Image: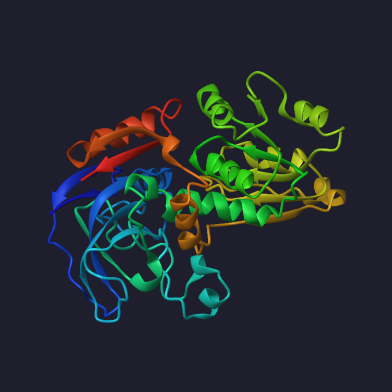
Amino acid sequence: MKALIWNKDKTIEVVEKEIPKIISNEDTIVKVTYSSICTSDLHIVEGYVPKAVEKTTLGHEFVGIIVEKGKNVKLKIGDRVAVNCESFCGKCFYCKKGHVNNCENGGWLLGCSIDGGHGEYVRVPFSNYTLTKIPKNVAYKNALFIGDILSTGFWSAKLAEARKDDTVVIIGAGPVGLCSALSLRYLGVKRIIITDINNNRLNIAKKESLADFIINPNEKDVINEILKLTENKGADRVIEAAGAKNTFEMSWKIARANAIVVVPAMYEENQILPLPIMYGKNLTFKTGGVDAFCCKYLMKLIRNKKISTDFLITKEINFNDIIEGYQFFKNNKDKCLKIAVKY
């Protein structure tokens, strides 16, 4: 089978690999039908993910169909499935508390330390937990983002604990920021401000009714604008989904006293937490990788047409063009949200 791998010299290439085999009774072999390219994939190629294993097939956001399964797997051969970006056992200390990102037996494996979804077939571990069946009225592309960015956005929105009348500021109108806004809207939040340096993405947020106000830091002073919109107090909740050099600092500066700041962003450099300066603001920070435990719930919302992430797909390509797709995704951040790769 064909698969896309990465090398330590920061290159990627399509190679021939053997079709994976069942190793555990909880494994499935999934034939990939669609995958997407994620910023986290670029982070691996650039060497920012220490746990990533060279020559591993990239890709952790994908859907497909079960073609083989271990004897303990409840799903059936032929079931269409969305794959969680995290593999988790459902039985360890952290899984029982819902902290599946910290599963003692799993975590972020696919496309990182074991072969992922940028190949024609994938071995998926812990399939009773890692896979979500796709209903008949949901197309593969409709379910493509459930296992990663939609889960991340929904998790971030829940962590924010926003009330309906709160003002929530989202830093970054990329896929995670937009999915956070989508989730906040579903949860009933009425006042959302999104800031980004990319007007194209800000306009998408407006068009999709995901933002009541949009602010481009290159055109207006973000702190002043937010103070104007919040009676000089600051945001009740902030979701930092950009991960740029100055956005973490922005996140706590625009928050009002006693606010919650959620940080799902992945940074390429260490960030500074200036506790003496922010001491009196009494902020609560919630950070880290997504606990993607709500995939079945999100699938139900998509099935019932309560939410949709279809607007995120900027471009669809065939797997044969995936290297060009990586280059397009990397070089066209101003115009590209997500690429759907068809197999």
Q: Quadrant of residue 84?
A: bottom left
In the rendered image, the vertical position of residue 56 relative to residue 167, given as above or below: below
Give the tally of numbered discs. Answer: 0
Q: Residue at x 24, y 54 (%)?
A: 32
Left or right: residue 20 versus residue 307 is: left
* Residue 126 point in image, percent of width and height: 35, 73
Tell me how the rendering is colored. Answer: rainbow
In the rendered image, the vertical position of residue 202 relative to residue 99, given as above or below: above
Q: List the single residue furthest toward the top.
A: 219
The answer to whether residue 240 shows anywhere in this view is no
Identify which residue, 270 or 238, lies in the foreground.
Answer: 238
Identify which residue, 84 or 8, lies in the foreground.
Answer: 84
* Residue 23 point in image, percent of width and height: 23, 76
In the rendered image, the vertical position of residue 261 relative to residue 222, given as above or below: below
* Residue 304 point in image, percent of width and height: 48, 51
The answer to whether residue 224 shows anywhere in this view is yes
* Residue 203 point in image, percent of width and height: 55, 24
The quadrant of the picture occupied by the N terminus is bottom left
Left or right: residue 210 versus residue 227 is: left
Q: Residue at x 34, y 60 (%)?
A: 110
Left or right: residue 317 versus residue 228 is: left
Q: Quadrant of residue 170?
A: top right
Q: Residue at x 29, y 49 (%)?
A: 8
